[in-house]
């Protein structure tokens, strides 16, 4: 998985990129948890999400937000990180101008950033949000949510109450032509410690159902 350097709005962004298997391979961008809580592109959950897309032939990019690892800049409370994600998506699309599909995946804080990017980039076809920090961060911008996707979390999430995630799922599910697949992994905490295999199974099952053929879009 080659290292790449992306020109971000606050300086260089450090990333890891896996090319797709075909010339028009779909693409997936993966976003890591909060930098102040040890979040980085090396997070095991982010890596697990990436593997689900890589084995389906996707061109896949994960990167460090500003101020993390060798990425330049400093934490910007979400606004700058959203700009970083947009720059990373631009880079991914420039490398893959004929991509058949575009997906985004995020973990915790990265899920919040990913959902914001989803609202701003109509070319994103689907999303996977792991442990979205509902109730801690404002998700009211999802009005309406433009794409179908998966929300998955653990039943022992110590950081986000299940009631807050259920409220978010209900809100998104009530929107016309949007399908939200909601899954709960038993005995998993916020970062799925010792439960990433179970998470991978849920993500793989969702992608199999949602995509059918990897080059077909999610049914709306």
Image: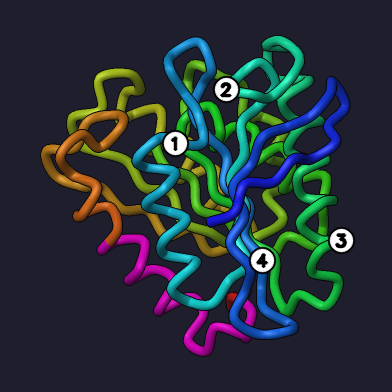
Q: CA distance from mark 3 to mark 2?
A: 24 Å
Q: Residue at x 56, y 19 (%)?
A: 137
- The numbered mark, 1 or 4, whose residue comes first in the sequence reads 4
Q: Residue at x 27, y 52 (%)?
A: 199
User: Depth-wise, is mark 4 or mark 3 nearer the camera?
Assistant: 3
Pointers 2 and 1 in contact (CB under 8 A)? yes
- The numbered mark, 2 or 4, whose residue comes first in the sequence reads 4
Q: CA distance from mark 1 to mark 3?
A: 24 Å
Report which residue position mark 4 lands on: 27
Pointers 3 and 2 in contact (CB under 8 A)? no
- The numbered mark, 3 or 2, whose residue comes first in the sequence reads 2
Q: CA distance from mark 2 to mark 4?
A: 24 Å
Q: Is residue 204 magenta?
A: yes
Asked where in the image residue 88 lies, by quadrant, the reply is top right
Report which residue position mark 3 lands on: 94
Q: Residue at x 57, y 39 (%)?
A: 31
Report which residue position mark 2 lands on: 69
**Helix, strand, or loop for circle 3?**
helix
**Looking at the image, residue 144 lies above or below residue 213:** above
Q: CA distance from mark 2 to mark 1?
A: 10 Å
């Amino acid at each position: 998985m080659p290292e790449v350097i992306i020109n971000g709005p606050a300086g260089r962004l450090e990333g890891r990129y896996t090319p797709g298997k075909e010339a028009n391979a779909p693409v997936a961008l993966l976003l890591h948890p909060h930098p102040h809580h040890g979040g980085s592109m090396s997070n095991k959950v982010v890596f697990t999400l990436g593997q689900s897309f890589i084995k389906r032939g996707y061109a896949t990019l994960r990167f460090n937000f500003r101020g993390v690892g060798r990425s330049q800049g400093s934490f910007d409370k979400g606004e700058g990180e959203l700009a970083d994600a947009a720059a990373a998506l631009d880079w991914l699309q420039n490398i893959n101008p004929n991509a058949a599909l575009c997906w985004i995946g995020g973990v915790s804080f990265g899920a919040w950033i990913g959902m914001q990017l989803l609202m701003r980039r109509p070319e994103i076809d689907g999303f996977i949000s792991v442990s979205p920090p509902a109730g801690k961060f404002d998700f009211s911008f999802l009005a309406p949510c433009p794409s179908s996707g998966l929300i998955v979390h653990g039943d022992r999430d110590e950081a986000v109450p299940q009631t807050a995630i259920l409220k978010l799922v209900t809100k998104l599910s009530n929107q016309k032509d949007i399908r939200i697949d909601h899954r709960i992994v038993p005995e998993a905490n916020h970062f799925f410690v010792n439960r990433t295999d179970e998470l991978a199974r849920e993500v793989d099952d969702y992608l199999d159902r949602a995509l059918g053929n990897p080059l077909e879009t999610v049914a709306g």
